[in-house]
Image (cartoon, grey):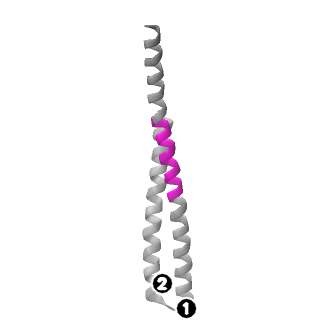
Amino acid sequence: MKYTKFFALAALAAGMAFPAAAQDRDLRNDYARVNRMQADIARDRARMNEDIRCGRSAAASRDAADLARDQRALNLQRRDIHHDQYEHAWR
């Protein structure tokens, strides 16, 4: 009987540890995605600036649209990270 309680307690502790590990992994993936998105935004901005300097207004307009779309996606990803951190703090 003593060992049964020990194993039950160990199983309970292990079950509580795995969601935290999954949450940490999810946050690492989210931060990596933010880094990639920021790099994409920097490339879009540089391309747009080059198009403006060279007088390619149609290309600059497309670049601006890409930049706005990427910025919105980045903002949503940051909001998701904030939400995940808030949930993690209350567990």
Q: Is residue 70 visible?
A: yes
Q: What residue sits 56% from the left and 85% below the top?
A: 50
Q: Is residue 86 visible?
A: no
Check disc 1 and give the amino acid type: Cys
Classed neighbour count for the residue bearing mark 1: other residues with Cα under 10 Å, few (<14), some (14–19), many (≥20): few
Determine the CA span between mark 2 and mark 1. Answer: 10 Å
Residue for point 51% across, 37% down: 89
Q: Is residue 66 magenta?
A: no
Residue with the most extreme bottom position = 55
Report x, y in % for residue 18: 46, 35
Q: What residue sits right under mark 1 in the picture?
A: 54
Nearer to the camera, 27 or 69 = 27
N-terminal label among 2 and 1: 1
Query: Going 54% across and 74% down the picture, which residue do you hit?
Result: 43
Vertical placement of residue 55 versus 18, above or below: below
Q: Position of residue 11 (x, y in %)?
A: 44, 23
- What main secondary structure does the magenta stretch of the protein show? helix
Q: Circle 2 is placed at which residue position?
A: 60
Secondary structure state at the residue bearing disc 1 = loop
Which residues lie in the magenta part?
19-33
